[in-house]
Amino acid sequence: MAGRPTNPAAGARGIAFDVLRRVEEGGAYASRALDAALGAAGALDPREAGLATELVYGTLRRALALDAALAPHSRRALAELDPAARVALRLGAYQLLVLGTPAHAAVGETVALAKAVDHGRAAGYVNAVLRSLSRAARFPDPPALEADPAGHVAAAEALPRWVAEEWVGWLGAGEALALARAMNAPAPLCVRTPDREALLARARAAGLAAAPAARAPGGVVLTGASVGELARAAGGVPFQVQDEAAQLVTLLAAGDLAGRPARVLDACAAPGGKAFHLAELLGPGAEVVAIELHPRKADELAREAARRGLPAVRVVCADAGKPIPGLEPGSFDAVLVDAPCAGLGTLRRHPELKLRRAPGDLPRMAALQRKIALNAARYARPGAPVVYSICSLSRAEGPEVVETLLGEGFRRAPPPAGFPADVLDARGDLLTLPSRHGTDGFYAARLVRDVPSTD
């Protein structure tokens, strides 16, 4: 089943179908593809835009459960179908099983979308499967939580079983279920600003539901508002979209350097949120050296720092896992290693990652993370904090990498004074969960080494 994208003028279902195909067939991120599609649609009725958003994110969040519900009605395994046919079946099933859309609309319009891209070759199959499902529209019952905790979490919340097993083994069955459920809820819009009171006042004056973030002093959380609406209301008050957990990572790394002319290394900087936060946090004469591997991203980061008026940010295009040209070991007052990761803490925003990640990704990522962390730590002066962080939730990428660092002469260091205690685990590491804290899932550890590295 192939063909050109359907016309966005088809409305919410057409837009959702196009976006889901880009995610499935082209590896696009749903958030970016949806923003582009809604922008291309022009003056779209807000209800249609809202429905398109619900269909895209809902279908991706529940994809594995939708596949399980469709399986008894399909002669072929869904994994064997052409991507567009699989997308059409999931889209129709989401409308039937979750939105309660009448069968004639859910089936008829989904089949029309299938016809538009393959001239009817697979539309008949999509029609037959969805009509069969409509006569028994239900998800399979999950196994009992007590008998099969991981199986229950996976089936009840459309999570890959291997992720469910990891979360149950790490956090326990009850917390894992709450976490998986929270990952299937929309994430709020959270921004960081150096002038929170002004931004709150202007947002509220414009009728936006805005509140200060619970823990990050520069954070603002908005409900039911878009970035565009906030930008219009802000009237020039600067802000950057950044989850509160990401803001807390920066504060863990350099909160005790606030207002000082310190020198901080951000070892994996793009797209720049934490580097810019560091520059706002530190005092006059400070320097934030932002390392980025890819030249295009490094150029974008440098341009954005200049646009934001942050001369403290100096971008270096280099591999943070190798000696960094021009940097002297032991010369930084703090080092932040926000390492590349599997992203399992961001499933609220990127539900497509559930369909792309595999168990083998974790040891592969952990090896890269250890390499970067050990190399970047060479640039911290003795006794300076080295913060290792990831926006993922797995033991292999989090605590097990930190155990490696502890074996290399590091020790855990206390957080800066006043750091919120409710996001610290029993070992003093940062662990945020959407089910507990309303933030993305982050893990971070603050470490120090008292003698220079001999690496």
Image: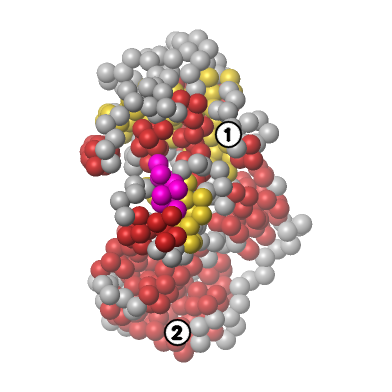
Q: Residues within 10 Å of mark 1 (few under 14, many from 20)?
A: some
Q: Which residue is found at the position 65% from the left and 51% from the top? A: 176
Which percent across, then down, holds residue 179? 61, 53
Can you tell which mark lies on residue 45? none
Q: Amino acid at mark 2?
A: Val
Q: Is residue 220 above or below residue 68?
A: above
Is residue 179 shown left or right of residue 315?
right
Judged from this view, the residue extending furthest toward the bottom is 104
Q: How far is the residue under mark 1 from the one under mark 2? A: 52 Å
Nearer the N terminus, badge 1 or badge 2? Answer: 2
Q: Is residue 413 above or below residue 367?
A: above
Q: Which residue is found at the position 58% from the left and 80% from the top? A: 137
Judged from this view, the residue extending furthest toward the right is 146
Q: Can you say which quadrant of the picture contains the C terminus?
A: top left
Q: How is the image coloured?
A: secondary structure
As rendered, which of 65 and 85 lies closer to the eye? Answer: 65
Whether residue 198 is in magenta: the answer is yes
Q: Is residue 354 above or below residue 368?
A: below
Q: Amino acid at mark 1?
A: Phe
Whether residue 441 is visible to the viewer of this picture, yes or no, is yes
Q: Which residue is found at the position 37% from the left and 22% from the top? A: 261
Secondary-structure class at tag 1: loop
Can you tell which mark lies on residue 107? 2
Whether residue 378 is visible to the viewer of this picture, yes or no, is no
Secondary-structure class at tag 2: helix
Q: Is residue 149 above or below residue 380?
A: below
**Disc 1 marks which residue?**
419
Q: Which residues are magenta?
A: 190-200
Q: Which residue is found at the position 60% from the left and 59% from the top? A: 181
Q: Residues within 10 Å of mark 2 (few under 14, many from 20)?
A: many
